[in-house]
Amino acid sequence: MRIIKNPDKKSKIQIPPSSRVPIETSENMFNHHVNFIVLGKRGSGKSILITNYLRMLKAENMADRIIVVSPTAGSNKALLDSLGVDDEDILDPDDVNTTDDIIAIIDDERDTYEMEIEKLTRWKQFEKLMKSNVPIESIDPHLFLEFCDSNGQPVAPTLKYGHRPCIHVWVDDSQQSALFRSRKFGNFVIRHRHTGPMKFVEGDKERCGAIGCSLYIAIQNLKATQGGCPKAIRNNATQMAVVGKTKDEGELKDIYSSVAGEIDYDDFVRGYEEATAEPHGAFVMDFHPKKPHMRFRKNLDTYMDFTETKLNPQPGST
């Protein structure tokens, strides 16, 4: 192959500045927003894994609103209460309006946040005027009505969550539902991080990008003639976890086919066997890790580095 470089500098690919506002989580957490597929048989521990990750996010004040889409949410009431899930945020996967309802929730949080940002902007203007030499009678009286308490003392406004809303959508027990058969839901998964776009104001880092949401999709079968995981969801996964043991080698190969570019098959099987050796164990694959050694995990707290094994073979190995 012969490579000839074009000397025209205008033809060089230029990366535009990002308008995305990052979600700041600790090093151990995933890069958000995520589309996290959690795969396992009934009773394997899918809900345990997702619940624990959301619990960790809540501890970091990064799970402001959790929407649960499940026909069996009632049987997990105690679990959902522990995550602070409101009844109004439990949706039915067989309701044809569910995707629209999720988008409406995100848009509503976006609208509230934009109003809060606008109010903070007015407050800063009011505060500046109060500290200036401008005569008090020259200041817009509506600002006093908006920002002063009954005693006439200025009170600074606050954000509802203290930051841009962090919204999470957990889809559980929904295979073969109307939701999984819906093209609208597939399209939503593809653009989940772009949902709830902000009104762009140049130079204002808060008024750009989108609110978006993170997705956690628990399924029992990755591929199946009826009720498999739609390709739009599989191909847009940012993380995938295999929870619990399976006796179906064909299913393992199906799962591997979705991550083949990330790991060798032998390493995949070895990682899976090690991670799922104990009850509710999970082999977690992160396709967008914060650091290279975080690509594979046993559960959420143990990293698995396959390059070390290859570079430093165990005694007696060839």
Image (cartoon, grey):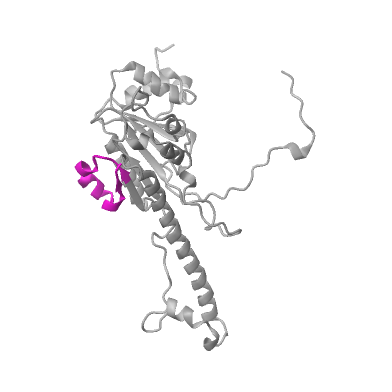
The structure residue drawn at horizontal position 72% and vertical position 37%, both measured from the top left corner, is 12
Would you say residue 301 is visible in this rendering?
Answer: no
Closer-to-camera residue (238/279): 238
Q: Position of residue 138 (x, y in %)?
A: 55, 86
Would you say residue 250 is visible in this rendering?
Answer: yes
Tell which residue pokes out farthest to the right in this image: 7
Q: Is residue 298 above or below residue 200?
A: above
Residue 71, magenta (yes or no) = yes
Residue 133, magenta (yes or no) = no
The structure residue drawn at horizontal position 49% and vertical position 49%, both measured from the top left corner, is 22
Closer-to-camera residue (18/24): 18
Q: Is residue 100 above or below residue 218?
A: below
Q: Position of residue 289 (x, y in %)?
A: 47, 36
Region rendered in magenta: 68-92
Residue 148 quadrant: bottom left
Residue 43 quadrant: top left
Left or right of residue 29, residue 128 in this image: right
Left or right of residue 136, residue 217 in this image: left
Count of labels in the image: 0
Left or right of residue 7, residue 145 in this image: left
Figure quadrant of the N terminus: top right
Figure quadrant of the C terminus: top left
Q: Position of residue 252 (x, y in %)?
A: 36, 20
Q: Position of residue 90 (x, y in %)?
A: 29, 47
Closer-to-camera residue (308/199): 199
Residue 8 quadrant: top right
The structure residue drawn at horizontal position 37% and vertical position 33%, both measured from the top left corner, is 181
